[in-house]
Image (cartoon, coloured by chain):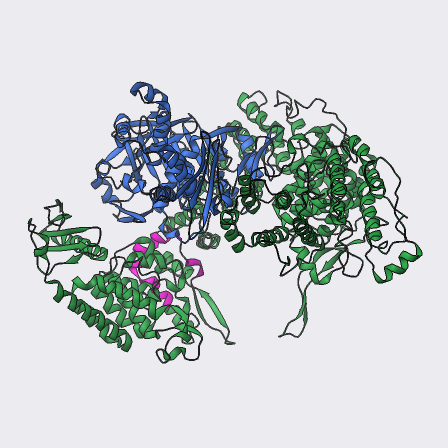
Chain colours: A blue, B green
Amino acid sequence: MENLADYEYATSSLLDKTDAGRALLLSHQTEIEEVNNVPCFFWGRLREPYLTARCLMTIAKTVRSRFALSMQEIMALRDPIVTAGAGQVRFEGFSSCNGVYARLDIQPEGLDGEFLASGTTNVDFNEPMINALNGITKTENMVLSVGQQSVTVISEKAKVVERKVSLPNRWIKGLTSVQHYLAEMQPVFTLTRPQAIQLFQSLPKGTVKSDVFVVQRAGKFLFSPLRQGQGVRVGGAHRLRLMDGLLPFLDSLKIYLSDDGQAAGFVLMMGALQLVFGFSADAYRGFSGEGKALEHLLDDLPMELVYGVNSLLKANEAFNPTLLSIEHDIDFGAMNTLTAQLSSIGLLGFDLVNNAHFYRRLPFKTTRILNLNPRLKNARKLVVDNTIQLINQTPDYIETRVKGTGDLVHTVIIDKGQARCTCDWFTNHQGKRGLCKHVLAVKMLKEQ
Amino acid sequence: MTRYFSFTDDKSDKFWQIDTHDTSFTVTFGKRGTTGQSQVKTFDTADRCQREADKLIREKTAKGYVESGDSQPITSQPRVATLRPASADKEAEIATLTRYDELIQQAPMAALLPFLQRVDTRHYEALRKKIKEARRYWCDYVVLKTIPTGVNKETVRQEWGHRGSWPQRIMISLSGVALLSMSELKPFDGVARLLIGADKEFRELARQLLEWAKPDWLGDFLLQQAGESWTTIGYHKLREFEAAGLVSYNPELFARSATTFSNWNSENTNRNERTYRYHIESLARDEQLVTRELPAIFDYPTEIHTYTYAFQGAKKEWVYHPVWPLVFEQWLTEGKIDRLWFLERCLSVQTKDWNINLRTFFRKQFETANPTTAELLALQPALLPLLAAQHPHVVNWSIGLIKTSSNDPDFQTDEFLEWVAAVMMRADCKTGLKTLLSLLERTAKTGPQYRPTICIRLADVFAVNDLPLQTKAAQLLTIYGDPSDPDLQSALQTYAGQMLGNVSIDLQTFLTKTDTTFADAADSSATYQYVPGKPVERLVMDQAVTLPDTWNDFLFLIGQFIGSNDPLDCEILMNALILPPANMPADFQEQLKVYHKKLTKTYFQSQVKQQTSMFLLHWLHGGMGQFTLSAHTTVQTLDLQFNRLQHVRQKWKAGSTLPLLSFPTHAPHWIAPKTLVERLLAYQQAGEAIVPLDLAIAIARMPREETAEAITLCNELTPPLASLMRYSLGASPERDVPHKTALDKLRALFQPKTNLSDQQILWAVAARTVEPEAEFSDFDQTHFADLPNVAKPFTQTIQITERWHEWRNYQTKQMERSPSWRELTITFPKLPDTLRPVLLYSNDLSERQNSSWAYHSLDSVDVAYWNSLLPQQPESLFTVVAKYGSLSSETSPAVAPALACMLQPGFRIRTMSMLVLATGLLAKKRETGTLAAEVLIHHFGEQTLDAVQLGDRLGWLLADNYAPLQRLADALNLVRDVSPLHNQALLLLLDALFARLAEAAELPKNTKKLLELYIDLLVKRQATPPAETVTTLKMWQQIASLKTTCAAILQKA
């Protein structure tokens, strides 16, 4: 398996000054040929140029940041991906440590233009362009162009610089697995702007090593070292500083927490713009390493079902599993699995505010994405190699021994859905980071 | 022309063919034996087409494709026909590899390139493998003993080293450069230095090799190396590479290279004033530098601020001279760069998240250029966005610049008022805000049309928790604001809860609704009433502790113990080892092997966990031999765990089926009285000896709750035990301490530890548990009467002393001193260093110089464990934490876990825990301070903290400069406004604190902060300051910095 995907932009994105105002012309590129051939997805005016520019700068800052030390810094992708369609434009990006996910959703009210095509692609975010975004004011006209209508016109003005981008696989994997976290997050708090500012004033300075919790006390919200009431846990809270610059412009701030209390979601509501942040359990834990989705991927769905959905939906369209299952006569259980699988192969994103999945096809080859779950692959191998010995099985209890490295044997017990294993992974994380390969293998076997 | 390449390995067998024809090429590829698919690409020029084609070919060969000697049009002929006779080919390949080995052995540098040039491309794959092998053999750093001597003369007589000599290793690296990909080159030595030509002797060779191999990754590689100055390619070299077509232009790489001066030969004696001038001159004359590189320097982070030129001064000392500022100056005066453009770029850099010194460098260039007012006005579109910049120093700086031009009629006030919105609520830009407020005041005065906007902006200042700023904003609002403006009303209303001191009263006309912060608090005039020892239920039903029932639960309990930070898991595990589940399988050791392995390779930071882990391993080995530890912890209390583990071992050896007496029945560490008496009865019936330590811990863990049944059961115990338990349960106040007869005393001379002394010690523990503050005369006759916490509660002298480091300067021969700091010193008595395990409350309370390190670095699990051994009276733990952990407010590692103990329900704060709490509030580490604030919030809410005592303690610490006062102000701000009760408690605390400070010779810096908090609390409580505080404030009014705040408070009196 190759670790990197390489691609090159033909031209650079730029912020161009024209007589009618400024135009943000984004250059795009993907691995998928048919998407690559689309010259332009959206062309139109931004209704809130200042805020949009600030949000795009925040996304740029996110994808350029790195909170956990990693030797792979140079491999970091520095560009977000963009999805245009169904009246909306979304920019998605990941910090290079894979721990912070940021997505800007520009709702139809924020745009005044034409969707020439729908789809998802990578866009070039270069330094000069981000510099230029800095001076955008509230009052000026600004045009956004996702993809460029006439490449030649633009390339005359900008020096054509071919920029090669290396895309680490973990980035793609993080992008897919974060959707599972978002999908099961529950809203906990909604803060007004003054409350949000007060909250951030209580954020400890510098790198925050221990966990902090967002707690509510007599109408004000604070970061506290203790969980109280329905406090939202945030690990590596210094990462929240990414939002700093946008706080003065908030309408409200919504805070979400995942079911297992590990990941936190922050949504900045700013009129027609929504900026979604997903924070992994800790600064050193990337979303790419979390095994959240693995459980849903145990049984393979027929590929034609997956492709079927692909042909049914357009980019950014809401994906409603209930409706789809009624219309196409698919049972609900299969639909849940389908939803999870589609997320895992990068076909669905999750919209926290509307609590719904939306369709978008990640601009990477599906084969690449399918290769991304080594734990699942290892589990399949355990099943195939016939290393599982069944000790005891009743309808809601199963006890097995699974062969480990060397002469070690792991005990795996699934009791009323509660799985336990004696391996290092389970011992160290006590089930907080997804199932280990042994439990996955036993579950697979059980399904068969 | 047509070129044909093929690739064969165990998985695939494919071909790739390229047909170049004028300005286009056709690529055909697929499985060998098929016709494959084709793609055509067309280019503007034939030259470009050829370059693209060459690039693709390089990529393919890099991936391992091998070119067939002659072009091979695609046919469907069988595969065999496309291959040459295999054996001849193999022979040639072997010959090539052998020749390579010889080359490396003999290391004739000059022969490398001719050799590589002669190698048939079909043998590249094999040679690549060979090169990697050679690198592993010759270049790895290994133990040299095992290899034949004489191979590498450089490393004779060294134990570790490389097998290859330096030239050999260079040759291998160079062959890697020629044939390998960038990622494959990673483990190779010195590639970066070779490529940038850092070593003179190999420079020419490396250059020739590059020109021949033309690696397509060169640009990427150089950029990757450009992060460090010593591996950044020199600018001249880079331009040579560019001219030779080795790298193509990349703005980031060229900008970095141009701004990095090779530091590795910076202190060169040939340099002087003249060469320095020449250097600047040569940079300033470089057209490419100014036209192409300069714009990119503003786009990418560089090292330009560290670029200096060093030469020796008059006294032979090295002086580092600036270079780029002079080059900029020259360009500007010669008109080579546009002033406005340059200034605008310097500003745009300020929004970047770059190195702070780099941003400062460009600010300095901006200031040096000394822009005129006209220029500043022209720069407004770039200057105003800086108000929304991320870094506070940038915002403050830009406000200063804006101020200088804001008087001009061309100043864009509308734009300015738009951008200013981003600063108004930033607590980190207070300096700038102050300037900004005066700027807004001037604007409002002269331009009535701006007043509504200005007032809306001013409302945001109330988000900043700073009384002077808020007061100023409120003052401006009352002058220029329109109380009937609904926008302004609603803007102010949102901040009503955050207004400090008198501000909300001053703005009353604007605020329509009253503050609703405490709408749900039933009685906002509730008074704070400290209740010492408020009863709290400890034996909570759903906190009951159970042992694993089944083998599987037992199995996973071990996993849980490894992963958890709760000392309770240690307790459960110890008892589970005594009472293993009934269905232990025969192959249990086999099943536990995983944990065995895990425990063997894990070292726990916590001493208690580490001891328990060792014990578990001992048990896994059969547990038959003696259990010993290679190293005991030097903390006495923690070493009790070793005694307890020995006890567990004795029990399983004796086949006991009873749990430890000290096994908690309820989380986190409590034992129900009834269960304890039942356990004692069971021991009695089974004839099992009671281990004093076990019983002592059990008594310390037993709260006086649900005692009725237990007291009745006591009747069945043997008399001495019954009276001890009755006393512990509160059924009888009589202490029945057995005393020595004359004969006992004689016996004690030979045998100091008798059953009698054990009983006496148990009584001492029980007495201290039940009556923590009392003095007892019962133990006067015992040999341990003088130990801390036996007859009398342990009291110590606490002092704050000034400390500093001192050393002799070897040049001036003078003594020098470091800045001083304050230390909290607590004196312990000097006692013989013997552990008396059962005397729980006395251990560790003696001066133990040699083991102080162990106390300084107490682990959080160990602190929790310590607390769990004496949960009703943990003052000795807090005494130790105060002595070692609170020594200095700068580093206080053990304070945070100790504070966590104070949050347990029913925790009673006494003298030493109060001291730890006070030092926690003053700790430098913010997380500790916040945790201490949480303790305050919790205990204020329960009314279980003596606010006056705490205030007094804090006043004492601050008066002696233990820590900066600002830290306390930050912590108390977190407690403010939690409830009216909390606010009142804070007032009590501050009154006591002020009383203490009034006695100080000099007030600590920032005392004003506390006064500001005080006035805010007074307003919220609608209270008046007590007489004593009024007197103090009248005295402080004489101090200039406190004058206004004191006056404001005294108005309330």
Residue interval drawn in magenta? B279-307
Residue at the image position 23 percent from the left and 62 percent from the top:
B243
Using the image, determine if residue B70 lies above or below residue B468.
Answer: below
Residue at the image position 56 percent from the left and 37 percent from the top:
A213
Q: State the image coordinates of residue B303 (x, y, percent, origin top left).
A: 41, 58
Using the image, determine if residue A217 lies above or below residue B183.
Answer: above
Q: Give the quadrant of the N terminus of chain B.
A: bottom left
Q: State the image coordinates of residue B117 (x, y, percent, origin top left).
A: 18, 68
Closer to the camera in the image, A52 or A16: A52
Residue A170: which quarter of the image? Answer: top left
Closer to the camera in the image, A212 or B687: B687
Residue B259: which quarter of the image? Answer: bottom left
Q: Give the quadrant of the C terminus of chain B.
A: top right
Closer to the camera in the image, A347 or B742: B742
Residue found at the far top of this picture: A327
In this rendering, the count of numbered labels is 0
Left-right relation of B402 to B1005: left
Left-right relation of B499 to B315: right
Left-right relation of B169 to A411: left
Q: State the image coordinates of residue A434 (x, y, percent, origin top left).
A: 45, 39
Q: State the image coordinates of residue A169 (x, y, percent, origin top left).
A: 34, 45
Q: Is B304 within the magenta?
A: yes
Q: Is A78 within the magenta?
A: no
Residue B169: which quarter of the image? Answer: bottom left
Magenta span main SS: helix
Closer to the camera in the image, A432 or A13: A432
Q: Is residue B955 visible?
A: yes
Q: Is residue A136 visible?
A: no
